[in-house]
Amino acid sequence: MLRLIEVLCHAPGPLRLAELAADAAVSKPTAHRLLATLVAEGWAVAYPGGRYGIGPTASGIGAAVSQGRRHTTVEAALVELQSQIGQTLHMGLRSGDRVVYTHKVEGVQPFAMLSRVGMQQPLHSTAIGKCILAGLDAPALAELVDRTGLERRTEHTHTTLDALAADLATVRERGYALDDEENEPNVRCLAAPVHTPDGRTVGAVSVSTVTFVVSREEVLALADAVRDTARRVESVMA
């Protein structure tokens, strides 16, 4: 049931039963039975044509959490950093074998990044994802790569385990990760990891720029500010 709610929250619009069941990794009969309960309790809404969307109960809880923690939230830390550097910022967390954006603060440029809250991205080709992967030991990394593969997103994407592992060693050494047009052409991102109190890497804070406006050197100069914000986020999440 929780997986169904998660799929509904991430979906850009209402989904058919078969899509929901597949994305939540449950059978169609099970999904249909659980959705009846979710609809009855307001967590989901049934639309004509056999489609389902997120319901008012889930939306209300999300709004309440955001409002209740407005001044002590991840978003507050990101907004403060954005006011200093003017670039687009993201917070992302690991969700299975992907990264999901949980927060986004748009920059001041006259163009917008295509990303959105709830969007899922690969681990190996994003700065946030590489921060997460840098927290894994060698066997865990190899197991994940064997399971997911290394999709070539651009000509700069790491597509071998050796190349990725070498990059992750650098991430651990310097305390931040760089996506240098590895996930999208003309987009360069720098991210700093976010850890739990017991030292696990669960996500990262990133700054996203376009290569024809912001140089590589200018992005690297933001590393300390991004790392400081990641530490603030850790204190909020602790």
Image: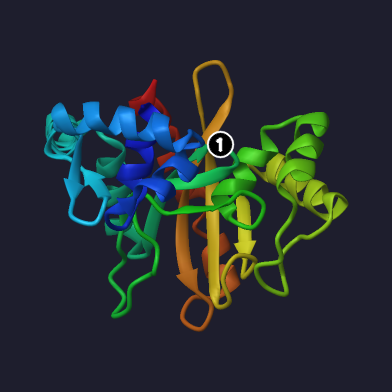
Picture quadrant where residue 75 is located:
top left
Seen from the viewer's position, the closer of residues 223 and 36 is 36
Image point (32%, 44%), residue name: 8
Spot occupied by residue 174 in the image (x, y as percentages of width and height): 68, 45
Image point (82%, 33%), residue name: 138
Which residue is at the far top?
A: 198
Image quadrant occupied by the C terminus: top left
Which residue is at the far right?
A: 162
Picture quadrant where residue 126 is located:
bottom right
**Count of marks overlaid on the render:** 1
Image quadrant occupied by the N terminus: top left
Spot occupied by residue 135 in the image (x, y as percentages of width and height): 67, 33
Which amino acid type is shown beneath numbered disc 1?
Answer: Gly
Q: What residue is pinned by disc 1?
A: 96
Seen from the viewer's position, the closer of residues 106 and 38 is 38
Seen from the viewer's position, the closer of residues 136 and 176 is 136
- Circle 1 residues within 10 Å: few <14, some 14–19, many ≥20: few
Image point (48%, 33%), residue name: 26
Q: Secondary structure beneath disc 1?
A: loop
Spot occupied by residue 108 in the image (x, y as percentages of width and height): 28, 70
**Residue 101 located left or right of residue 169:** left
Spot occupied by residue 36 in the image (x, y as percentages of width and height): 24, 31
Q: How is the image coloured?
A: rainbow
Image point (38%, 42%), residue name: 7
